[in-house]
Amino acid sequence: MSLRLLLTFALLTLSAPAVFGAGDITGKFTINGKTITAPHVHALLHDNAEGVLPSPTQMRILVTDREVPIEALYGLTFLPVGDMGRRGEVEGVLLQFDPAKPGEVDYTVLTPKGLQTVTIRISIKGLKVVGQKVSGSFDYTDNSFASDPDYPKVSFSFRIDAPVKRPPAVTADLKGTAARNSPQVKALRAIADAIATGNFAALHKLTSERATIRNKEEIERLGTGAKATYKGVGADLQRSIRGVMRVVVRGDRAVVILPENGRVSFIFEGGTWKGD
């Protein structure tokens, strides 16, 4: 399966909000030669209750050209802020790392032509996470893709002092029969059946608004080969569901954890659980 298909279908592979307050940021941030003169910075420290993140906690530092909702940083793998970047609703960078190992950073460029995610080594000086605050200096210039016109060029040198937010608390952790009979897994079976039969109309009704947009874009990109590709993905998903391991719920969001570190995100939208 192609990487692009995996990225597009976060829900298959593993995948009117309040605005939260920005922290203080000083310094410079440029993307493709454009300087963001009044950047916003936000920090979220995500726990690993689901057991699928690479570290006990994950710090997410988001620097953007405009304010975004806190929900944009919720999730485990493919975050809502990525969809916002693809749609041109926000530009910026997302840094994700283990606070205990700040030299190993997953770096995502948020632009309509970007969204490359790579692991980089950047200079983080004086990183401190004390109580509900994080501070430190971040410096980086991307020269690795200088000759690639399609790769976004980013450089930054800034210091932050930001409040640390956290995701919603776990409200249910289901295993065994409870997980298999959960509304999320029932919805996932319906999604798998729709994909395995190439029933795109049914699929769109079973997925969230943002997931449906991604699905339609990928179907259009695949063209005449869409149904064959989706049917293969659906068959794989049907098999994986038989071994469902856990369902972890955080209020109106949930994740179904499948074998081999597979996970499928859900959101309670329009009165029902939908793949997200």
Image: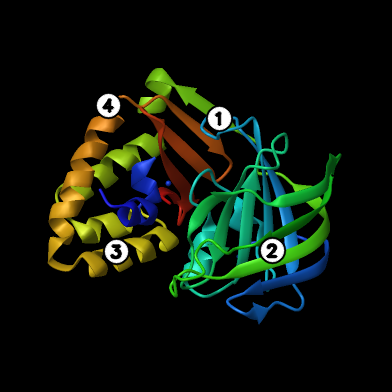
Distance between the alpha carbons at the discs numbered 1 and 4: 21 Å
The residue located at (42%, 62%) in the rendering is 209
Tell me the mark number nearer the camera, choosing from 1 and 3: 3
From what the image shows, is residue 222 above or below residue 32?
A: above
Q: Is any part of residue 154 visible from this angle?
A: yes
Label 1 amino acid?
Ala
Q: Are marks 3 and 4 in contact (CB under 8 Å)?
A: no
Q: Which residue is mark 2?
A: 63
Nearer the viewer's eye, disc 3 or disc 4?
3
Frontmost of labels 1 and 4 is 4
Callout 1–callout 3 Cβ contact below 8 Å: no
In the picture of the structure, the residue carrying the numbered disc 1 is 172
Near mark 2 (Cα within 10 A), the count class, few <14, some 14-19 or many ≥20, is: many
**Residue under the point 40% across and 19% down:** 176
Q: CA distance from mark 3 to mark 2?
A: 28 Å
In the rendered image, is residue 23 in sight? no
**Of callouts 1 and 4, which one flags the residue occurring earlier in the amino acid sequence?**
1
Residue annotated with mark 4: 242
Residue under pointer 3: 218
In the rendered image of this protein, does residue 175 appear above or below residue 276? above
Q: Residues within 10 Å of mark 1 (few under 14, many from 20)?
A: few
